[in-house]
Image: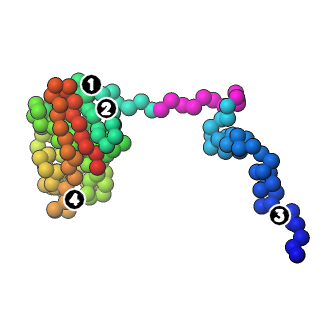
Amino acid sequence: MSSPCDCPRRRFVAQLATLGAGALVAACAASEGTAPAGDTNQPPPAPPPAGDPGVRVVGNTLELTLAQIPALSAPNGSYTHGASRTFVIRRSATDYRAFSNVCPHSACGVSGFDGRAMICPCHGSEFDPATGARTAGPAEVGTSLSTRPTALDSVAGIVRVQLA
Ligand code: FES
């Protein structure tokens, strides 16, 4: 027959039994940095960071409202959506393309476009703006930026990019 002990686990379980579920949730919330209701000593939570105007993600689609994105207002423009690591380029009035911006050399974010090539700022690898294939630089021959399907809704002035 075992005798009762006063070990920490038993004390913890006993305390759980005496606490209501609400008190337990409040205690957990306080430990996560979220104040329980009625606690006036905690600052209000910070608002979520604002995204770029004209940019939103709907499900698995990145939507770019062109009138609100000056970087895509003319051919040879480009825009990087950092959260999805997507690089969008405008090649002509109606030709928009999108790629993963993860450079196959060392994973820097490809962010340059001069109309001839997409360029990695870290070591200068260059990529074909039609296909994403590597054309120069330390990235290995045969590597590329992966393409992301893109569609222009010319009536709404929105480019939609299917995210990976
Ligand atoms: S990481 Fe892009 S060229 Fe090195």
In the shown orientation, is residue 130 left or right of residue 8? left
Give the vertical position of 124 relative to 45 (above or below): below
**Can you identify the residue that label 2 sits on?**
55
What residue do we see at 19% from left, 60% from top?
A: 143
Q: Can residue 82 be seen from the camera position used here?
A: no
Q: Disc 4 on helix, strand or loop?
A: loop
Which label sits on residue 7?
3
Cβ of disc 4 within 8 Å of ligand 1? Answer: yes
Q: Disc 2 on helix, strand or loop?
A: strand
Q: Disc 1 on helix, strand or loop?
A: helix
Q: Residues within 10 Å of mark 4 (few under 14, many from 20)?
A: many
Ranked by sequence position, the earlier of labels 2 and 4 is 2
Which label sits on residue 48?
none
Quadrant of image for the N terminus: bottom right
Q: Where is residue 2 in the image (x, y as percent from the top left)?
A: 87, 73
Quadrant containing ligand 1: bottom left
The disc labelled 3 sits on which kind of residue?
Cys
**Can you identify the residue that label 1 sits on?**
68
Q: Where is residue 155 in the image (x, y as percent from the top left)?
A: 16, 25
Q: Where is residue 93 in the image (x, y as percent from the top left)?
A: 10, 31
Which numbered disc, 3 or 4, marks the residue closer to the eye? 3
